[in-house]
Image: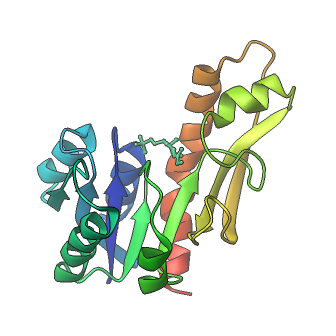
Amino acid sequence: RHRVGVLISGRGSNMAALVAAAKAADCPYEVVLVASDKPDAAGLTHAAEQGIATFSLSPKGMAKAEYEAAIDGALREAGVETIALAGYMRLLSGDFVAKWRDRIVNIHPSLLPAYKGLDTHARAIAAGDREAGCSVHVVTEELDAGSVLAQARVPILPDDTPDSLAARVLVEEHRLYPQTLAEYVTR
Ligand code: GAR
């Protein structure tokens, strides 16, 4: 099976969805490493409980190149072929992305190219949009700009807050990401 490394920064619910899907015998990928830039990320505990190798390193006080070299080393040591970003809230450098060209994917909580960056749900509500959603895309140097592999849409309801909308979108993220990653690694 294709070896996937997942990078997280927090809760890790998308990582958990990727891991859960990989339990199916016909899933074409397995998650071999979960790595975090936040040593206290809740997702690390879940990954360890699932018997998955974890790696964490805070970039505080390190040069970006040094930090990324450590992450790169951990991924390569684990034999990772494709990296799935799952709530990893740090921009990867052009050098890092170039080393993994077309082998990094991300899930973003908007219908790209709309609302790159942060606070996507608050921005969609403030704009009066009727629809929101999530996108799985290939990672390039430019933030949230690589080619979109798949999207899922949800309605924005009149009483929505950013939190209620995020919860509705998250259900779709957990469905879309495993399916899209499975297709991507068998492309
Ligand atoms: C998810 O909604 C993901 O789409 C978003 O952060 C959340 C992480 O939740 N990602 C980004 O905003 C990337 N810029 P999770 O840790 O429970 O998967």
77 to 62, vertically: above or below? below
* Front in this rendered view, residue 141 or 88: 141
| Residue at 16% from the left image edge and 59% from the top image edge | 54
For residue 86, side relative to residue 71 (left or right): right
Question: Percent from the top left, x then y, of residue 28?
Answer: 40, 79
* Front in this rendered view, residue 147 or 177: 147
181 to 21, vertically: above or below? below
| Residue at 28% from the left image edge and 51% from the top image edge | 37
* Front in this rendered view, residue 88 or 129: 88
| Residue at 52% from the left image edge and 61% from the top image edge | 106
Instruction: Work out which quarter of the rendered image holds the N terminus and state it.
Output: bottom left
Q: How is the image coloured?
A: rainbow
For residue 89, side relative to residue 118 (left or right): left
Question: Percent from the top left, x then y, of residue 150?
Answer: 68, 64
113 to 1, vertically: above or below? above
Question: Percent from the top left, x then y, of residue 162?
Answer: 63, 23
Instruction: Work out which quarter of the rendered image holds the C terminus and state it.
Output: bottom right
User: In this rendering, does residue 81 appear at all?
Assistant: yes
User: In this rendering, does residue 26 appear at all?
Assistant: no
Q: Which quadrant of the view contains residue 46? A: top left
For residue 44, side relative to residue 98 (left or right): left
| Residue at 43% from the left image edge and 53% from the top image edge | 86
Question: Percent from the top left, x then y, of residue 124?
Answer: 77, 32
74 to 156, vertically: above or below? below
For residue 185, side relative to residue 16 (left or right): right
